[in-house]
């Protein structure tokens, strides 16, 4: 690898280097980090709505098939179950990816805010329960606030839905009988489902963390002359000759 290409690789930096990169630009960097964090949170819930729509439609179709008397009822149930597994596991993985980038910008805010606003984001205020009676504490446990993570709960729900779809897939499959020939349609469909879900967790589904080496092109543009006579565009270097 050439020396220029090596300059594009990703490398770890120290806290001193981080401070040097943003020295004198802390206020602008903090503002950008807060804006991108809010944008990531908006995308997080938009993605959740997107997956809920697909999963809900698939589940409704599964229930409709189960209640029907269609001849290919089992085949359709297996197909919808495989779709449910892929959609729900993809939702679980997307939640993890969204949380990663959200935390990335939260960590930037944690570091940059000290010299701009002070540790506003890191100071947590909560209720003082000293002097509360047992009944008041019980009532506070039901109606009061709690340091629960909304994104973690959403992630646990997506994992639960994925496990539920796996169980529905198992329910839809015929009973194991070694005297019956293999149903290659089911085998291929389930194998494809496993491969797609596995691809989310390995290299195919992970963000690229290496460096980039870009290509660039400059497009020329000019105004057409009033006499409608187009002059040939001079080639590069022609003006120097």
Image (cartoon, helix red, strand yellow):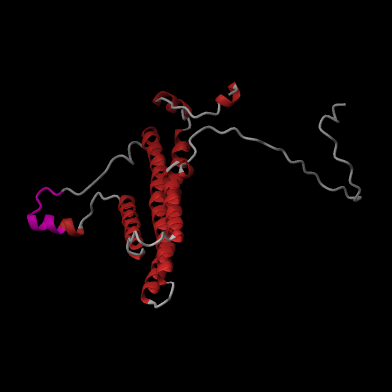
The spot of residue 2 in percent (x, y) is 60, 22
The spot of residue 146 in percent (x, y) is 23, 52
In the drawing, does residue 189 fall left or right of residue 6?
left
Q: Please tell me whether residue 135 belongs to the stretch shown in magenta.
A: yes
What's the residue at 85%, 40% (across, down)? 233
Q: Nearer the viewer, residue 197 or 159?
A: 197
Q: Please tell me whether residue 13 belongs to the stretch shown in magenta.
A: no
What's the residue at 46%, 37% (across, down)? 29
Magenta span of residues: 129-139
In the drawing, does residue 169 fall left or right of residue 140?
right
- Identify the residue at the far bottom of this view: 69
When asked about the image quadrant of residue 214, the answer is: top right
The spot of residue 132 in percent (x, y) is 10, 52
Q: Is residue 53 visible?
A: no
What's the residue at 46%, 56% (across, down)? 188
- Identify the residue at the far top of this view: 3
Q: What is the tally of numbered marks visible in this picture?
A: 0
Q: Is residue 156 visible?
A: yes
Which quadrant: the N terminus?
top right
Q: Nearer the viewer, residue 195 or 142?
A: 195
**Please, is residue 71 above or below residue 53 in the view?**
below
In the drawing, does residue 130 fall left or right of residue 71?
left
**Please, is residue 134 above or below residue 206 in the view?**
below
Which quadrant: the C terminus?
top right
């Amino acid at each position: 690898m050439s020396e220029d290409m090596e300059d594009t690789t990703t490398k770890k930096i120290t806290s001193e280097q981080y401070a040097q990169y943003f020295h004198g630009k802390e206020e602008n960097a903090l503002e950008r980090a807060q804006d991108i964090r809010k944008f990531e949170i908006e995308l997080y819930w938009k993605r959740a709505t997107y997956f809920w729509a697909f999963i809900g439609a698939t589940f409704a179709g599964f229930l409709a098939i189960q209640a029907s008397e269609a001849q290919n009822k089992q085949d359709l149930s297996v197909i919808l179950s495989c779709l449910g597994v892929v959609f729900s596991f993809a939702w679980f993985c997307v939640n993890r990816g969204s949380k990663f980038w959200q935390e990335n910008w939260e960590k930037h805010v944690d570091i940059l805010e000290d010299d701009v606003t002070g540790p506003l984001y890191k100071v947590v205020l909560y209720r003082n329960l000293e002097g509360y009676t047992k009944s008041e504490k019980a009532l506070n446990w039901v109606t009061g606030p709690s340091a629960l993570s909304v994104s973690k709960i959403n992630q646990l729900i997506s994992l639960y839905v994925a496990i539920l779809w796996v169980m529905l897939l198992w329910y839809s499959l015929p009973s194991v009988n070694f005297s019956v020939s293999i149903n290659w349609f089911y085998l291929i469909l389930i194998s494809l489902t496993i491969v797609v879900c596995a691809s989310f967790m390995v290299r195919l589904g992970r963000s690229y963390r290496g460096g980039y080496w870009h290509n660039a092109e400059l497009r020329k543009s000019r105004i057409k002359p009033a006499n409608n006579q187009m002059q040939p565009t001079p080639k590069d270097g022609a003006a120097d000759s």
